[in-house]
């Protein structure tokens, strides 16, 4: 019996021994605090040297595949340098078998070459130059965008490709026909919200945004339907004047609008209206010139657009409508909007007077011109006949 149980007086020594062993093992793997701060890389031996040829993906992931690794950039910012190798295999890039060094051209060995940048943003813009090898079209579009202009003007918030796409986790966004996949489409506002959070907040509550984000309805516009993706343009007067054309891509599509019981004539009625007529002329002749004539968004709002029957600012509600007109017609009284056709085309029930006056002209003008033409022609024939008769008789 005795021999089978450890002597209880030895237990403290055993515990102490295990503790000392753990500490010794631990210090052997402690990070070199100058290169890596915080949760750290399993220490590579001090004088480890790896040539470019030895840096296979599995070598990269041998170090970078561990979770929780952090490095410190020259400006002091911490950067996570852990890459999930398993996840990478499932990405658009990993499943094509792209080696890490396709993009990481500057990593030519270990220790890595000294960084030539100070900040994370500079690192992003430098690293994403590699994208143009395969995505030249998107790269060129971004070059023309307001985002790139902001970057070049020194705006440190301007996005690099990697603010919208993580190359190590990227999955497919568009199908073979170039249509954005449903899930990717629903995620777009969230991508933009990283920097345009206030607009995202408005959009989320709007008729378009709530339909997309809450119901997953991909018929409704996401940010890029109105702004484009890579070549996002500035919001200037030319954009304002062409904005009705953006709305009418969907709102003049009868099949689409029928699904929602909405009129598909809002664009044609708008253009026929004095407001739209003026805007159309400006767009064609002087797109840079300021006009105070309303486009769709002046009446409907932009990112906070609601249904016409929404109590807060829906335009079916008379007081809401009047407020909208008063922005530009400050003297407008309660009856002012009533005299206006809105998007309606006149019919025997809606604006019958306008309808019948139109109808009258529609019938009278061809009739008068037709009778006139008949008169002229018959007169001409008559003269011809008279002339011939005259020739024969003489
Ligand atoms: C022996 C371990 C090790 C290997 C192998 C390794 N790295 Fe690193 N990597 C590091 C450490 C440590 C850092 C932190 C900065 C430093 O010490 O250079 C780092 C930093 C980076 C960075 C951040 C930018 C920079 O240069 O600091 C990138 C990008 C990177 N590694 C990519 C790679 C790629 C791609 C491979 C394979 C081709 C690779 N690494 C192989 C240890 C390694
Ligand atoms: C399609 C191009 C591409 C491929 C392939 C790629 N990377 Fe990267 N990687 C980038 C870009 C771009 C950045 C800069 C990201 C940023 O803006 O922070 C980056 C950043 C890094 C960083 C620094 C941490 C970070 O996220 O900024 C590490 C470490 C890294 N990559 C390792 C790897 C490893 C390991 C592989 C292969 C398993 C790999 N990369 C494959 C493009 C790529
Ligand atoms: C402001 C965010 C943003 C930036 C910056 C951005 N993209 Fe995109 N990109 C998107 C969105 C959103 C989509 C998917 C929507 C779509 O095209 O239907 C996309 C789609 C893509 C596609 C799929 C094909 C296509 O054109 O739709 C590629 C490839 C791509 N981006 C590469 C890039 C590259 C390379 C850069 C940098 C030069 C970049 N992107 C910069 C947001 C961005
Ligand atoms: C060596 C070529 C190569 C490089 C470099 C490269 N990519 Fe790709 N990328 C691809 C391929 C191939 C696909 C898959 C396209 C497909 O399956 O339709 C892809 C897909 C994508 C997609 C999804 C496209 C879609 O059709 O849905 C995005 C976004 C993307 N890459 C962004 C980037 C970014 C950002 C960089 C730079 C950090 C980059 N890529 C660098 C080859 C590359
Ligand atoms: C990483 C930050 C960032 C992300 C992500 C981002 N933007 Fe921007 N955006 C900016 C900055 C910075 C500007 C320039 C702001 C300025 O000049 O006032 C800008 C400008 C714009 C402008 C022009 C504004 C004007 O007044 O002319 C539009 C439109 C725009 N972004 C749309 C988008 C859309 C759509 C997305 C998503 C696909 C997006 N942005 C994602 C940072 C970002
Ligand atoms: C239905 C079309 C439409 C959608 C959807 C849309 N926008 Fe806009 N956006 C516009 C129009 C039109 C303007 C110009 C407003 C003006 O002239 O006052 C604008 C203006 C902007 C501006 C610059 C003006 C400002 O208020 O700062 C930014 C930035 C912007 N939008 C970003 C976004 C983002 C991010 C999303 C998605 C969450 C989005 N937009 C969704 C049509 C749209
Ligand atoms: C990508 C297509 C698309 C674009 C672009 C678009 N819309 Fe819409 N819009 C819709 C759809 C679909 C609905 C119906 C949503 C629902 O009921 O769930 C809608 C609903 C509306 C409504 C609410 C109608 C009601 O009373 O129920 C208004 C107002 C509206 N849009 C105005 C605009 C304006 C103004 C623009 C341009 C700045 C615009 N839309 C751009 C697709 C679009
Ligand atoms: C001068 C103000 C004004 C302008 C400009 C204007 N709208 Fe409207 N819109 C209204 C009013 C008011 C209503 C509610 C009309 C009603 O049903 O009585 C409305 C209703 C709508 C509806 C709902 C239609 C339905 O079937 O219920 C849509 C969609 C719409 N407008 C889109 C547009 C688009 C797109 C443009 C630009 C091409 C535009 N609007 C320009 C004032 C305006
Ligand atoms: C963004 C400014 C703006 C808004 C909002 C606006 N209008 Fe106008 N409206 C104008 C301008 C400018 C003209 C004169 C130029 C023209 O004919 O286009 C005009 C002309 C008119 C006219 C022609 C008679 C006249 O006074 O010259 C009527 C009627 C009219 N608007 C009704 C309305 C109604 C009703 C609303 C509200 C639903 C409204 N407007 C909202 C700017 C606006």
Image (cartoon, helix red, strand yellow):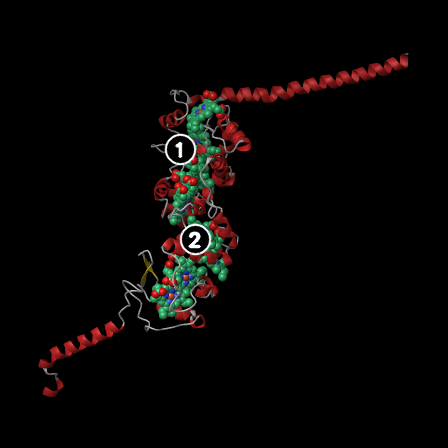
For the residue pair 72 and 83, the one nearer the viewer reads as 72
Q: Do the residues labelled 2 and 1 touch (CB within 8 Å)?
A: no
Query: For this view, does 365 lie left or right of residue 252?
Result: right
Residue 45: give x, y in percent of width and height: 32, 73
Name the residue at 35% across, 40% down. 202
Q: Is mark 1 on a helix, strand or loop?
A: loop
Confirm if mark 1 falls within 8 A of ligand 7: yes
Task: Classify mark 2: residues with Cα within 10 Å, few (<14), some (14-19) or many (20+).
Answer: some
Confirm if mark 2 falls within 8 A of ligand 3: yes
Q: Which of marks 2 and 1 is nearer the N terminus?
A: 2
For the residue pair 224 and 263, the one nearer the viewer reads as 224
Residue 240: give x, y in percent of width and height: 46, 35
Q: How many discs appear?
A: 2
Find disc 1 in the rendering and name its residue.
308
- Residue 169 in the image: above or below residue 22: above
Image quarter for ligand 7: top left
Name the residue at 11% across, 77% down. 12
Name the residue at 35% across, 44% down. 197
Determine which quarter of the picture holds residue 167: bottom left
Q: What element carries label 2?
A: helix
Which dot marks residue 370? none
Find disc 2 in the rendering and name its residue.
161
Position of the C terminus, as image quadrant, is: top right
The answer to whether any part of residue 276 appears in the image is yes
- Residue 211 in the image: above or below residue 10: above
For the residue pair 313 and 120, the one nearer the viewer reads as 120
Residue 178: give x, y in percent of width and height: 51, 52
Residue 97: give x, y in percent of width and height: 47, 66
Per the model, the C-alpha gap separating discs 2 and 1 is 38 Å
Task: Classify mark 1: residues with Cα within 10 Å, few (<14), some (14-19) or many (20+).
Answer: some
Query: For this view, does 172 lie left or right of residue 373?
Result: left
């Amino acid at each position: 019996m005795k021999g089978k149980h450890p002597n209880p007086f030895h237990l403290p020594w055993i515990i102490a021994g295990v503790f000392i062993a753990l500490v010794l093992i631990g210090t052997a793997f402690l990070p070199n605090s100058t290169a890596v701060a915080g949760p750290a890389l399993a220490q590579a031996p001090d004088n480890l040297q790896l040539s470019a040829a030895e840096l296979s993906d599995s070598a990269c992931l041998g170090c970078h595949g561990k979770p929780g690794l952090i490095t410190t950039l020259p400006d002091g910012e911490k950067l996570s340098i852990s890459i999930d190798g398993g996840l990478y295999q499932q990405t658009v890039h990993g499943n094509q078998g792209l080696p890490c060094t396709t993009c990481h051209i500057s990593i030519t060995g270990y220790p890595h070459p000294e960084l030539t940048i100070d900040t994370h943003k500079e690192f992003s813009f430098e690293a994403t130059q590699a994208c143009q090898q395969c995505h030249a079209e998107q790269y060129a579009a971004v070059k023309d965008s307001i985002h790139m202009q902001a970057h070049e003007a020194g705006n440190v918030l301007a996005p690099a490709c990697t603010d919208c796409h993580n190359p190590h986790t990227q999955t497919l966004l568009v199908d073979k026909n170039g249509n954005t996949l449903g899930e990717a489409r629903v995620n777009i506002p969230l991508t933009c919200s990283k920097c345009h959070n206030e607009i995202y907040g408005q959009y989320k509550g709007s008729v378009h945004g709530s339909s997309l984000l809450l119901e997953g309805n991909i018929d409704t516009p996401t940010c890029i339907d109105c702004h484009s993706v890579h070549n996002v343009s500035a919001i200037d007067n030319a954009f304002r004047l062409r904005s009705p054309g953006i709305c009418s891509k969907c709102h003049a599509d009868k099949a689409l609008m029928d699904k929602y019981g909405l009129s598909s004539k809002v664009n044609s009625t708008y253009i026929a209206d004095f407001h739209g007529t003026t805007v159309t002329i400006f767009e064609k002749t002087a797109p840079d010139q300021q006009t105070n004539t309303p486009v769709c968004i002046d009446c409907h709002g932009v990112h906070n657009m609601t249904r016409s029957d929404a109590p807060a600012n829906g335009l079916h509600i008379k007081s809401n409508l009047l407020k909208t007109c008063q922005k530009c017609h400050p003297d407008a009284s309660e009856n002012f909007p009533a005299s206006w056709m809105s998007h309606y085309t006149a019919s025997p029930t809606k604006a019958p007077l306008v309808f019948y006056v139109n109808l009258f002209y529609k019938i009278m003008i061809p009739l008068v011109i037709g009778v006139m033409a008949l008169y002229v022609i018959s007169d001409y024939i008559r003269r011809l006949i008279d002339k011939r008769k005259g020739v024969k008789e003489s």
